[in-house]
Amino acid sequence: MEQGEIILYQPDEAVRLEVRLEDETVWLTQAQIVDLFQSSKANISEHIKNIYDQKELEESSTVRDFRTVRQEGKRQVMRNLTYYNLDAIISIGFRVNSKRGILFRQWANKVLKDYLLKGYSINKRLSELERTVAQHTEKIDFFVRTALPPVEGIFYNGQIFDAYKFATDLVKSARRSIVLIDNYVDETVLLM
């Protein structure tokens, strides 16, 4: 959906609304909200007033005037119309006591429940994946640490015993054969 796009909302044969999309939200005029919830203008006006009086929503962020071209008789006239965003529409929908208001609340509750359940299952799967990755990382780190050969020569001053132990362990761990490639090692190494 693109900025300023107008889409058609038609939940049944009786209601057909052109919905304005702007700033990643839906905008409807009061007349469209009356049609959507099949209520009266006075009732919707009262709900809007109460929503802002009770500070459920902030009027400055949920109400906007848009210049709209309207057909008046045979001529087209540009008028500023007041639009209410999705937050206001939802708040009104939870206050309206009409059949359409009830259907709206049932739909909103179902959608909310679906999103919550999907969010919970996604978070659960993500936690399991993070735990699995951490376990694999620990295993990989262990194998890397234990499989690393010494980085420097093993036979140098002060380290004879450690070198002897390393060479002995190396010979014992060989499965078939040992190949020694070192200018300073002779057959005495194998006599250990």
Image (cartoon, rainbow, N blue to C red):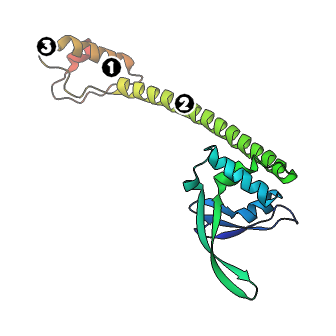
> SS class of the residue under badge 3?
loop
Task: Give me the disc on residue 188.
Answer: none
Q: Does 127 sit left or right of 10 as displayed? A: left
For the residues labelled 3 and 2, the Cα–Cα distance comes to 43 Å
Residue in the picture at 75% in, 55% down: 44
**Residue tagged 2:** 132
Residue density around tag 2, few if under 14, some if 14–19, many if 20 or more, within 10 Å: few
Q: Residue at coordinates 72% horizontally, 50% vertically from top-left?
A: 47
- The Cα–Cα distance between marks 1 and 2, rounded to whole angstroms, is 33 Å
Residue topped by disc 1 = 170
Among the two numbered marks 1 and 2 on one chain, the one whose residue lies closer to the N terminus: 2
Disc 1 marks which amino acid?
Leu
10 Å crowding of disc 1: few (<14), some (14-19), many (20+): few
Q: Residue furthest left?
A: 157
Which of the two discs, 1 and 2, sits closer to the camera?
2
Residues at marks 1 and 3, CA–CA distance in whole angstroms: 20 Å
